[in-house]
Image (spheres, grey):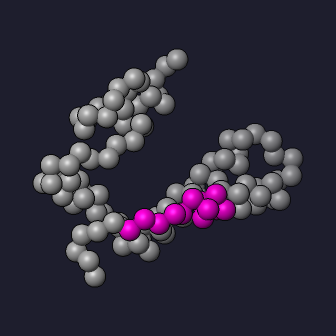
Amino acid sequence: MTKYGVCKVNIDTDLRLALTAKIREVFATKPAEFDPRNYLGPGREAIVGMVRRKLQALNSVGKAEAVVKQWKKAASPCPRTTRNRGKGEEDKGEKTDKDPQREPH
């Protein structure tokens, strides 16, 4: 086993299948359902469950803090998502509380 390394695993298909299966289940049991909140909520929960199973299968649960610590030790910038940045803000490695999805338009 490698002490440090990268393992890229594509799980997008599994997540889409989990979402689609749950939406189909809701429509099959409640054919008159049309409100997206009533089928996307359970779909989102199915995705969360799949992500948890994948994290366990990949032995990745609880390792985020150690990975960030290793990046800082190596003086490498930590990867960031646009979700963690403010509008128009570039990734400079700094921490920000802004979430563009939650800002008023």
Looking at the image, which residue is at 73% across and 55% down? 23
Residue 54, placed above or below residue 68: below
Q: Residue furthest right?
A: 32
Query: Which percent across, then down, holds residue 93?
Result: 25, 38
**From the viewer's perspective, is 75 left or right of 78?**
left
Quarter occupied by the N terminus: bottom left
Q: Is residue 4 magenta?
A: no
Asked where in the image residue 46 lies, by quadrant, the reply is: bottom right
Looking at the image, which residue is at 20% across and 49% down? 76
| Magenta residues, start to end | 7-18
Asked where in the image residue 87 lies, by quadrant, the reply is: top left
Q: Nearer the viewer, residue 101 or 25?
A: 101
Q: Nearer the viewer, residue 84 or 76?
A: 76
**From the viewer's perspective, is 35 left or right of 56?**
right
Looking at the image, which residue is at 63% across and 48% down? 41
Query: Which percent across, then down, holds residue 86?
Result: 37, 27
Q: Is residue 17 magenta?
A: yes
* Count of marks overlaid on the render: 0
Query: Which percent across, then down, holds residue 42?
Result: 64, 53
Looking at the image, which residue is at 52% across and 63% down? 10
Query: Which percent across, then down, holds residue 79?
Result: 32, 47
Residue 103 seen by the camera: yes
Residue 69 seen by the camera: no
**From the viewer's perspective, is 28 left or right of 17?**
right
Q: Residue furthest bottom?
A: 1
